[in-house]
Image (spheres, helix red, strand yellow):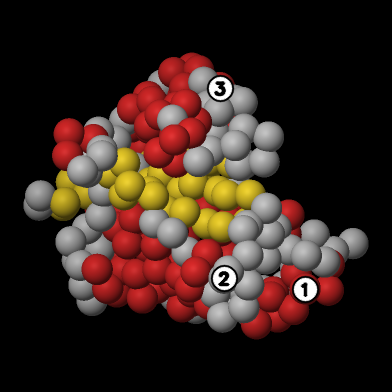
Amino acid sequence: MPPLNSFETWSIRSAGGDRKPKSKCFFIGEGPNAEYWYLKSLAVRLAKMNAPELIELKPVERTGNERNQSAPKKLLEQALLIRNNAEMFGFDPDTDRIVVFFDVDVYKGDPELYASDLGMFTGIAEVAVTNPSFELYLLLHLDDALEKYVLPNEKEILDNGYVGRRRYVEKLASDVLCFNVKRNEKVGELARRFGVAVMNERKLNQDPSQSIGRLTSNVGARIMELMHTGASSGESYLGLCKRLGIEDEFVE
């Protein structure tokens, strides 16, 4: 089995599954479990809504020796593997995209290294980051997450120290969501509340370059940008936003 396997979603669509997509977007998540389960579930849900019409979303599963290779520089190598192996992945540099999802907490206290590593993705992959980690984004799927769980615990979340054997935000998310967010595939079910997460996320910092020391997530924003550019028309995009319960930020 190859170390990277991309999940195909085009044929899942209720309409247009037999047509070839105009472009593809590969999702590479830092974690081998939670991120992949969530992104796969979200891609399937959106595909069943025929969204985005012009782009196929392809979550990438890491296997073998690559499974636990999650440092940003390793994710860059994996993005390059996709770009440079057209036979396996069918990547077209003129039309296709890659989005890499990773956590910022490993750069705490080292903004220069973070800025350097962020820059290395330029021209290779787009980034969706969370500070401190992806579990913060998972919490945003709850209606009252910011007011009840995130903002009252902002300092503890940013410090993200260990509570027993788990990081603070991982334990908080697991306790609030009532399942282990690192080990339980139920994390994929949160994709049904993607619209809630998008709206909550807008109240946090969404600029990856400004994420050190700030609660940050641009996961929802990055995916919605794909929905916008991959829509067949403005009307179609607005219809998707309505179905997802999202107030569109691209409309003037």
Note whether 241 is above or below 31 in the view shown. below
- Say which amino acid is labelled 3: Gly
x then y, percent, for residue 20: 62, 58
Of mark 1 and mark 3, the one earlier in the sequence is: 3
- Say which amino acid is labelled 1: Ser
Look at mark 1 in the image and give the residue it sits on: 236
Please rate how many residues cluster around mark 1, counting C-alpha atoms within 10 Å: few if below 14, some from 14 to 19, many from 20: some
Is residue 112 shown to the viewer in this render?
yes
Question: Is residue 168 or residue 92 the one in the foreground?
Answer: 92
Question: Is residue 205 or residue 191 the one in the foreground?
Answer: 191
Q: Report how far apart the C-alphas of labels 1 and 2 lie in the structure.
A: 18 Å
Q: Secondary structure at mark 2?
A: loop
Callout 1 touching callout 3 (CB < 8 Å): no
Look at mark 3 in the image and give the residue it sits on: 119
Note whether 18 is above or below 36 in the view shown. below
Indicate which disc residue 17 carries: 2
Please rate how many residues cluster around mark 3, counting C-alpha atoms within 10 Å: few if below 14, some from 14 to 19, many from 20: few
Q: Secondary structure at mark 3?
A: helix
Of mark 1 and mark 2, the one earlier in the sequence is: 2
Is residue 226 shown to the viewer in this render?
no
